[in-house]
Image: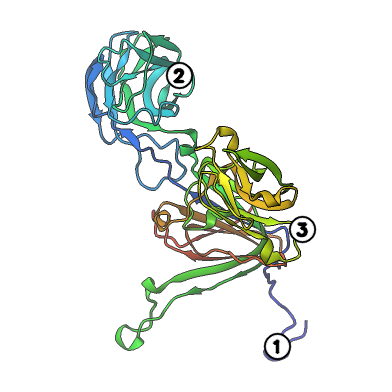
Amino acid sequence: MAYNGCKTDVFLSKIGLDTLDESREVYFSVKHDVDACVKLSTRRYLSVVGQNASFNAQRRPDDAFNCNPDGCKNSGTLFVTSTAKTPAGAKFAIQADATNFAAGLLTHYVELPAGEYDIQAVISDITEENQANADVYTQKVKGPGVFPVLVKLYEAPTTVRGTGWTETEEGILLEITATPVTTNHIAPIGLSSIAIFDSIEDLEGAQTVAISCVTEITGDITVEATDATCLGASYAPNSVAVEKTITATQATPNWHLLNPIIGKGEYKQGFVVAKEQKIVKSITIDGDEYGYVMAQDLSPDECEFFYATIADSCNVTDAMLNLVNTPYALDINERQFIVLDGTTTTAADKGRFLFHRDLIGKEVIFTYPKAAEVEEFVAHSNNLDGVSVRVIVPFDQTDGTKINHIYDNVLVTSFPGSIGTEQPTFNFTLSFQRDKRNGHFYRVQRVTE
């Protein structure tokens, strides 16, 4: 090794970041808090099955139906004791429209000593004080410990009392008990946090979205400096800004969940715009002859997106026909058409396009709203506060070390909406905020295995 003044031919080992490749994926967790509209603290019991009831407000079970919940969804625990091998529990009145959740889910928590127990939920109308007509759901749970209990109201009950539970708008009477099967001790039984969900979809919480073929990740961390003349040179903590823009060309099919104003989906009857070409046939209605074509599965809720034009006309403007909005068959001219909905004629007329008799034998092209089962997502500013996003951005160093940047509180401030003849790119602008729990902006994890 030669030494020449300040120069040396020995260098420290260094690393860089690998360039992005098509296999690189960025993962988002889009989380809607799972929270039932119908909830009841077991503090509010009507009566006790057993003896020596006491409520511990600090004994809150961990949330089994939420991933990283925002705030506390669960309440304290009611403890009840009983004699050996007899039920211990309580009865509750829940004033809520039971027609909404009669095919939904009931959840609660039990805290059990060692042994096996029959956990029973008896559900009747709120007016059935003695629960002579009720549905009974029973399941076995082994203690010791705190356990979530889920009752599937959409399934047949284990047993039925009398004529069974008939749901009403007034509410339900609910009795929850735990009966020891394999033990004789009389240690307290705990009941906590009753919740009722309208459907399984209400339990859809965190959904993962992945974008791939990432071509660029840009953005910097900026921190402003304070005025050195007043306080000396230092940073302004409140000025920290962490923002990145991620550009990619592929994403999982649920990528729309990253749109901050999009709410949770709802399955419902919707429509698609269908287009057909048919020959106009003849029909007589109330003694008058019309031309007609039939539209199949016409949406019952839509009265727009109807269009008709003559197919073999060389003058496109003259070929276009105008819709007359009426449920009745009227005396229309050759430039008009009517769509019957079957309400004023016969059910068989639903979706019948009526034309002037001069168009009989001609081909027409027509569009209409066709009924379809859809999952509808509504964009509204009210959705901005109902969702939280986490992001994992992976990096590879040139020495093979993998680095994950984990951002726990992310605001998606720009959502892609452009499309063209070329394959569109997804550009997401992300603003990284302090985590609500600990104030961190993000975490860096170096994979060491």
75 sits left or right of 319 in the view: left
Of residue 34 and residue 344, the one placed in the foreground of this image is: 344
Q: Amino acid at mark 2?
A: Lys
> What is the C-alpha distance between the residues marked 2 and 1?
74 Å
Q: Residue furthest bottom?
A: 5
Q: Circle 1 — which element?
A: loop
Eye-nearest disc, 3 or 1: 3
In space, the residues marked 3 and 1 are separated at their CA atoms by 86 Å
> For mark 2, what is the residue?
142
At x 34%, y 43%, the residue is 72
Q: Nearer the viewer, residue 98 or 325?
A: 325
Q: Is residue 318 above or below residue 185?
A: below
What is the CA distance from the residue labelled 2 to the residue labelled 3? 76 Å
Image location (x, y in percent) of residue 327: 51, 44
Work out which residue is located at the far front of the displayed protein and give it: 287
Q: Nearer the viewer, mark 2 or mark 1?
A: 2
Q: Is residue 140 visible?
A: yes
Residue at image mark 1: 7
Q: Is residue 3 left or right of residue 201?
A: right
Query: Mark 3 sits on what residue?
Result: 312
Q: Residues within 10 Å of mark 2 (few under 14, many from 20)?
A: some
Of residues 364 and 242, the one drawn nearer to the viewer in this rendering: 364
Which residue lies at the image location 57% right of the left edge and 46% below the top edge? 339
Residue at position x 28%, y 21% in the image: 126
Q: In terms of sequence position, does the residue under pointer 2 or pointer 1 come before the other?
A: 1
Viewer can see residue 424: no
- Vertical placement of residue 212 versus 173, above or below: below
Q: Position of residue 432 (x, y in %)?
A: 47, 64
Where does the image place residue 349, in percent across and percent down from the top left?
A: 59, 37
Q: Secondary structure at mark 2?
A: strand
Q: Quadrant of the N terminus?
A: bottom right
